[in-house]
Image: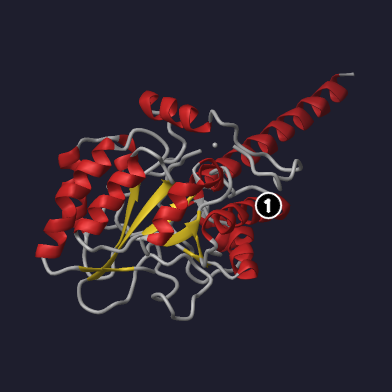
Amino acid sequence: MGTGKSARGVTTRRALLVAGGLTVLAAAYTHDPALWLADAGQAHPVHPTPTPGGPNPTPDHAPTTSPSATPTHTARLARQEAAGTHPARRQPHRAGHQPHRAGHGHGGKASNLPMTHVHDGRKGIALTIDDGPSPVYTPQILQLLAKYRVTATFSMVGLQVAAHPAMAREVATAGHMIANHTWSHLDLAFQPPAVIADQFNRATGAIHKATGRVPSLFRAPYGAWSPAILECCAQTGMAPLGWSVDPRDWSRPGVPSIVGNIMRNTATGSIILEHDGGGNRAQTVAALRIVLPRLLDAGYHFTTP
């Protein structure tokens, strides 16, 4: 009798230890999706620097077999930001800690890892703007870009494109590049291939329907990458797009903070991350109004990945 209880006790303790170990391992993978790449045999794992998110309605061709956001997605993200619980920042970006550069400039042969730098000569840089289009903030940013003759890359969320197709067309007509930023800004890092493909394809469908363009770039929400996401990029012919300068404008840290971060960290080849969707972007617009002429005066010129 005593022996049986002892054996059951040992078994229970072993089970608890195994469960605890799995919990720790899962937490490690959640904290750093780069571990997926290391396990997949990547020679140079990506160090993710997450991105935040945006948004809204469903087009006629929307499948019903995968999760999708509702029209309240933008409001939910705004509430999360206000509460300081925005899911984008699982691992805060540290100045000077750059993701591994992968990929080449526009027109070059892309590698299988997210590109974090552009290659357009001395002081060539890129501006990327995520989570739109927004009927409020995208037009303001377009006016600034036109004023300073800057071409940018807009990473668009499919739901937002479906909700504001005319705004997406205006971005395209102005000559800016459009990247696929998924259908509903879903964190794809632990999603199965079928869900990943659905998020890719629905966003591409919305972008093509609104603008006539098929995007050649893909940016993962939250900067969260996995082998399955990179494989889907390869299958769809979209180069994975990262960044190297993150002023965390999504958190609304104040215009001086955004400006100072960009001016301190921008160098030849930098890809700057900003946002026109997913919440109140008034600080982003105000910061760009200051940053664009300063960067141009410093001798930088803008290109696209």
Q: Identify the coloring.
A: secondary structure
Q: Identify which residue is drawn at 59% across, 65% down.
A: 233
Quadrant of image for the C terminus: bottom left
Q: Identify which residue is drawn at 33% across, 60% down.
A: 152
- Asked if residue 170 lies left or right of residue 184, the reply is left
- Asked if residue 48 lies left or right of residue 140, the reply is right
Total tally of numbered discs in the picture: 1
The residue tagged 1 is: 198
Residue 268, placed above or below residue 245? below
Residue 154, placed above or below residue 270? above
Q: How crowded is mark 1: few (under 14 residues within 10 Å), some or many (20 or more)?
A: some
* Residue sitting at the far right: 1
Q: Pick whichever, 272 or 179, lies toward us.
A: 179
Observer able to see residue 208: yes
Amino acid type, callout 1: Asp
Q: Pick whichever, 183 or 99, lies toward us.
A: 183
Return the x and y of residue 104 as percentages of the image width and height.
41, 76
Q: Identify which residue is drawn at 51% across, 56% down.
A: 34
Residue 160, placed above or below residue 145? above
Observer able to see residue 48: no
* Residue sitting at the far top: 1
* Residue sitting at the far left: 297
Return the x and y of residue 237 as percentages of the image width and height.
59, 70
- Asked if residue 228 lies left or right of residue 174, the reply is right
Locate residue 264: give its quadrant.
Answer: bottom left
Q: Could you say whether the residue bearing mark 1 is in a helix, strand or loop?
A: helix
- Asked if residue 208 lies left or right of residue 305, the reply is right
Return the x and y of residue 119 as percentages of the image width and height.
32, 76
Residue 281, placed above or below residue 194? above
Q: Identify which residue is drawn at 48% across, 80% down.
A: 109
Return the x and y of residue 20 as percentages of the image width and height.
63, 35
Quadrant of image for the N terminus: top right
